[in-house]
Image: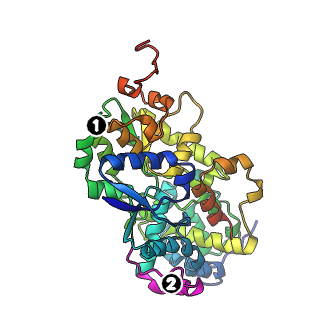
């Protein structure tokens, strides 16, 4: 089957490996993503005041384009895009007069009927593909891996927009268990990583990331699995420099590894695979030697 | 030092503006502190969210100069947990909007190093600009 796809800016700049892995696992599941021929930035954060209508224009334009392109629904990989678009969609449905007013000032480019739907890829995998079908496709269960699923904010909040119970989510846990991984959990899984404070208050990001990684390690985690490209950036670049960093994977990469796909196709290099401590001959077939095993 | 405060409703110009922009009724707050207890950035705030609401209700001066406005990223944990149904991130956003209109942009964009601009994900930059510039 085919599915319209809204990538968003970050997926095309600093999270290409997430897209690469998503395309690979969806191919294995018989799904092809069809990128929207034209799209713009989603606006990233939903405006929370009732007096800043112009900031609803970016996400509404994405939704209007989707309908103009003859689509009813689009899938996205980015948590922030998903959250922003889903909330703009809610606004369009509950306050259509706001969309009409914005459209009147923009020459008709925001003519949106509220009939579009934005799906997070995790929605699609859980509700359309189903965990049973994913489990069935697993060729190489992640038995040796203890993972700490990290949800952050935008996947879960506000309730009604989020994908799962905002206090005790199960989505990533269930997915990782379907892949055969051991799941370890903790109270910081649903706490913010610091998000865009990475721009001008990076020490706060380091504090949050450090506390969360420590909790994950104490629980026995060998890797963290997450979804959001901003969380990924923060966890990959702001871990306190004490010993080896905790590996951080997108859930798409974890699925790809369990499907037995070539790590290179998932945007993972040998060093990253080795850090997971689950390397097997199939991952290092040609010309790569692992010290202490075959050399 | 003496600080002049007004009981709720006496002056309250800022309070009324915040309530209009955020759509929240701050007199609903009964000061349980659940918002502050769960906030991942409470340690970096110069005034905690429950106290900030109290300051607005009593017209305590200096609210718009607080660092807490910019430390809050709108993760919405407090909104999720408030037993009185107050959407604190909307209150913070209203205060940011008023401060931005009064004092101008808070993010010195020109001072962000070129290397950081290269490395930062676009969502970080755009979100930061949206929250800290007018």
B119 or B106: nearer the eye?
B119
Residue A23 is covered by the magenta coloring: no
* Residue A255 found in image quarter: top left
Q: The C terminus of chain A is located in which quarter?
A: top left
Q: Which residue is mark 1?
A: A180
Q: Secondary structure at mark 1?
A: loop
- Please state the extent of the stretch shown in magenta in the rendering: A94-116
- Name the residue located 42 percent from the left edge and 51 percent from the top edge: A151
A263 or B34: nearer the eye?
A263
Q: Residue A163, how many percent across, how many down? A: 36, 59
Do badges 2 and 1 share one subunit? yes
Residue A108 is covered by the magenta coloring: yes
Q: Residue A11, how many percent across, how many down? A: 52, 53
Q: From this view, report whether residue B29 is shown above or below residue A136.
A: below
Q: The N terminus of chain A is located in which quarter?
A: bottom left
Q: Which mark is residue A98?
A: 2
- Name the residue located 52 percent from the left edge and 75 percent from the top edge: B26
| Chain for disc number 2 | A
Q: Secondary structure at mark 2?
A: helix
- Name the residue located 56 percent from the left edge and 38 percent from the top edge: A239
Q: Residues within 10 Å of mark 2 (few under 14, many from 20)?
A: some
Q: From this view, report whether residue A66 is shown above or below residue A246.
A: below
Q: Residue A20, how many percent across, how many down? A: 45, 46
Q: Earlier in the sequence, mark 2 or mark 1?
A: 2
Q: Residue A18, how many percent across, how many down? A: 46, 47
- Name the residue located 52 percent from the left edge and 67 percent from the top edge: A38
The structure's colour scheme is rainbow
């Amino acid at each position: 089957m085919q599915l319209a796809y809204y990538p968003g800016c970050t997926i095309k700049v600093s999270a290409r490996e997430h897209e690469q892995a998503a395309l690979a696992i969806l191919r294995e599941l018989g799904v092809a993503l069809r990128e929207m021929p034209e799209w713009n930035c989603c606006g990233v954060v939903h405006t929370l005041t009732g007096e800043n209508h112009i900031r609803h224009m970016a996400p509404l334009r994405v939704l209007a384009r989707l309908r103009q392109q003859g689509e009813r629904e689009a899938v996205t990989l980015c948590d922030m895009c998903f959250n922003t678009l889903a909330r703009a969609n809610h606004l369009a449905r509950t306050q259509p007069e706001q969309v009409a007013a914005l459209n009147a000032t923009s020459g008709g480019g925001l003519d949106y009927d509220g009939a579009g739907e934005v799906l997070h890829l995790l929605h699609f995998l859980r509700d359309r593909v189903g965990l049973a079908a994913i489990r069935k496709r697993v060729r190489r269960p992640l038995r040796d891996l203890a993972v700490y699923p990290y949800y952050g904010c935008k996947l879960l909040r506000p309730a009604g927009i989020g994908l799962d119970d905002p206090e005790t989510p199960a989505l990533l846990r269930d997915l990782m268990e379907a892949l055969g991984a051991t799941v370890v959990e903790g109270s910081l899984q649903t706490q913010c990583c610091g998000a865009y404070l990475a721009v001008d208050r990076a020490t706060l990001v380091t504090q949050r990331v450090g506390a969360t990684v420590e909790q994950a390690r104490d629980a026995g985690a060998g890797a963290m699995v997450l979804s959001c490209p901003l969380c990924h950036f923060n966890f990959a670049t702001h871990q306190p420099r004490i010993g080896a960093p905790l590996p951080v994977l997108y859930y798409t990469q974890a699925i790809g590894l369990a499907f037995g796909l070539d790590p290179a196709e998932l945007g993972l290099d040998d060093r990253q695979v080795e850090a997971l401590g689950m390397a097997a001959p199939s991952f290092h077939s040609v010309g790569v030697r692992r010290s202490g095993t075959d050399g | 030092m003496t600080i002049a405060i007004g009981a709720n409703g006496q002056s309250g110009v800022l309070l009324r503006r915040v309530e209009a922009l955020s759509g929240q009724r701050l007199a609903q707050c009964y000061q349980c502190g659940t918002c502050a207890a769960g906030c991942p950035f409470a340690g970096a705030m110069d005034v905690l969210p429950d106290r900030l609401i109290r300051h607005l209700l009593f017209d305590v001066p200096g609210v718009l100069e607080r660092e807490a406005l910019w430390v809050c990223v709108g993760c919405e944990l407090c909104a999720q947990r408030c037993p009185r149904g107050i959407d604190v991130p909307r209150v913070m956003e209203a205060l940011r909007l008023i401060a931005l209109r009064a004092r101008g942009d808070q993010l010195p964009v020109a001072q962000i190093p070129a290397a950081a601009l290269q490395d930062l994900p676009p969502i970080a930059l755009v979100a930061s600009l949206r929250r800290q510039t007018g």
